[in-house]
Image: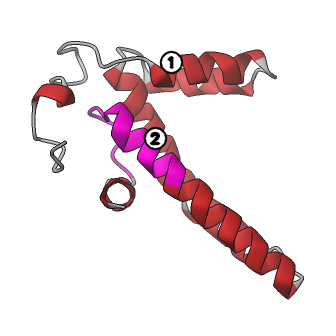
Amino acid sequence: MNYFLLALKNFAVFSGRARRKEYWMFILFYLIFSIVLTIVDQILGSAFLSLIFSLALLIPSISLTARRLHDTGRSGWWQLIALIPLVGAIVMIVFLVQDSKEDNEHGVNPKGSTEAGITA
């Protein structure tokens, strides 16, 4: 849960790097909350809660993905490859599961530092 809250605190930070664990823990909690809100919406007969949740977390998820791509040595603009049907999503998943690169132009390797605010 700390990683989810950390991503929300850094919702507009598009610079720096994010570890794999930080990214995938955010995705895990995002999916859990999304499923729960979808069930509640089905019970209530609306789609309001799911829509508000998705819109509220759009910018934090984009910024976290950019930081994750920075960690693999890529620009955050690589997110646009996901717009290519099927192939783009596969390429993005491959990029996102790769291990951290050594220090690069986006900062020091977060695996070896405690600058992220959370230690493993």
Contact between marks 1 and 2 (CB within 8 A): the answer is: no
Q: Is residue 57 visible?
A: yes
Which residue has dot 2 on it?
Answer: 24
Quick check: 116 left or right of 53? left
**Sequence-earlier tag: 1 or 2:** 2
Q: Which residues are magenta?
A: 12-28
- Residue 52, relative to residue 116: is it above or below? below
Which residue has dot 1 on it?
Answer: 95
Q: Amino acid at mark 1?
A: Phe
At x 33%, y 46%, the residue is 13
Residues at marks 1 and 2, CA–CA distance in whole angstroms? 13 Å
Q: Secondary structure at mark 2?
A: helix
Q: Quadrant of the N terminus?
A: bottom left
Image spot of residue 33 (x, y percent): 59, 66
**Considering depth in this image, is 42 or 88 the residue closer to the camera?**
42
Q: Residue furthest bottom?
A: 44
At x 52%, y 50%, the residue is 28
- Residue 32, relative to residue 80: is it above or below? below
Quick check: 23 left or right of 9? right
Image spot of residue 16 (x, y percent): 26, 33
